[in-house]
Structure formats: structure tokens, C-alpha cells
Amino acid sequence: MAKRYVEKGLTNLVRARPIIIVVSLHPDGTVNAGTFGAYTNVSGSEIGIAIGKMSHTYRNIKRVGELTINVVNKPMAKAAEICGRDIPENESELEQANLHCENSKKVSVPIIRECVANIECRYVKEIEINYHSFVIVRCIAGHIEEKFIAPDGGLDVVKSQAIFNIGYPEPLYATLENPFLVR
Ligand SMILES: Cc1cc2nc3c(=O)[nH]c(=O)nc-3n(C[C@H](O)[C@H](O)[C@H](O)COP(=O)(O)O)c2cc1C
């Protein structure tokens, strides 16, 4: 097997989580939405997300302490790109992306109706790393589209056509197919 040695962009070598839209609330009530791909599960109930410290998402999470994670699928790819734009803080990306809010059960921040799964979360702690902060959040409640529930209760990322950005910052996305078991 021929391999290339690299020293830059190393975390891109393990990029395999569906794109999410993080919803947060500005104190004036504006619902903010930002698209994120650099995140990971850190335990059964905690997720860590690398969030730019200049982003509205970061500032809102630090002020309010709550957020929702909303999983994007293929029909929503354009909406995710719109939520990834730098839109003024007093405007809602959701309106521009034609996405709709629904009340959460346990947090003040809404979830996105069109997303295939949603998780309601609370801020736990952060680790600041240069321009980003690795923000660890606790998952409090979840919502998942019935037809996309996998046998283990999680999201069926193949059937739901959850999308993966495979060339950030290029708007190049892929879905997963041909899953196989190794016994
Ligand atoms: C597919 C995609 C993935 C992204 N992933 C991240 C990420 O993991 N971390 C981050 O800080 N910004 C990421 N961005 C950029 C943010 O979405 C962008 O900075 C956005 O303006 C943040 O919104 P906000 O200022 O309303 O919080 C991503 C954008 C796209 C389109």
C-alpha cells in the first residue's frame, strides 16, 4: 500500500460525522443558526464541538448556556450552506434558509423541524484552542424521525441521507451507502 506522508490538515483524515446545524439564542430573542462539522462524541451523553470564538453561536452558548444540535440530510444541503454564511447577529439564518423552529422540551432554544434528528443540549465546559473553542455540551433530550430510526435506536445515517462535508470549505458533500458488517 502506497501512502503519502502529511503534516498539515491531519484532523481531516478522520472526518466522518454528519453535518449539524447548531441553533442558539441571542439575548434579544433572535434565533441563530450555524453549520458545524468539526465535532465528536466524547461520552454517551456529551458531545464536543469546535466552534469559532468569533461566531454568534459561540457567544450565544456562553451567554445562554443552551443550544440544540440539528442533523442535516441531503434535501437540506443548501440550507446548511446558508446557515454557514456570516449573517448579521440580529438576522436569523433560519428564515433565509426557509427552515422552521419548533419548541424544545427541556431547553429554551428551539429545534429545527426539517432536520432528521435533534438534540437538546446544555453547556458543560470548554477548551480554548487558538481561534476555536472545543465546547463540550451535555445532551438532555432528543428527537428522531420515526422512519430513520436504526435497530439500535440511533439515527440511520444511510437511510436518512445524512450528509458529510468531504472537502471543507468547498461545498462538496456526500452521503453514505453500501454499509457492511465485519464479524
Ligand atoms: C459544512 C460546514 C461546516 C462547518 N463547520 C464548522 C465547524 O466545525 N466549526 C466552525 O467554527 N465553523 C464551521 N463552519 C462555519 C460556520 O458555519 C460559520 O462560521 C457560520 O457563520 C457560523 O454562524 P454564526 O456566526 O451564526 O454562529 C462550517 C460551515 C459549513 C458550511
Image (cartoon, rainbow, N blue to C red):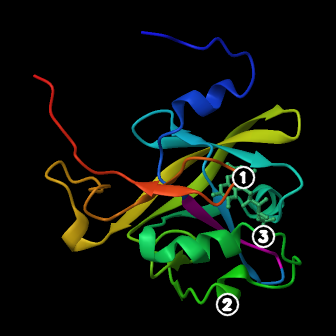
Q: Nearer the viewer, residue 102 or 117?
A: 117
The quarter of the image that holds ligand 1 is bottom right
What distance separates the C-alpha of mark 2 from that of mark 3?
A: 13 Å
Is residue 143 visible to us here? yes
Which residue corresponds to mark 3? 85
Ligand 1 is within 8 Å of the C-beta of the residue at disc 1: yes
Which residue corresponds to mark 2? 95
- Looking at numbered disc 3 in the image, what kind of residue is underneath it? Arg
- Looking at numbered disc 1 in the image, what kind of residue is underneath it? Pro
What distance separates the C-alpha of mark 3 from that of mark 1?
A: 11 Å
**Image: magenta residue range:** 20-27
Ligand 1 is within 8 Å of the C-beta of the residue at disc 3: yes
Q: Nearer the viewer, mark 2 or mark 3?
A: 3
Question: Is residue 84 one of those drawn in magenta?
Answer: no
Question: Is residue 23 one of those drawn in magenta?
Answer: yes
Q: Nearer the viewer, mark 3 or mark 1?
A: 1
Q: Main secondary structure of the magenta part?
A: strand
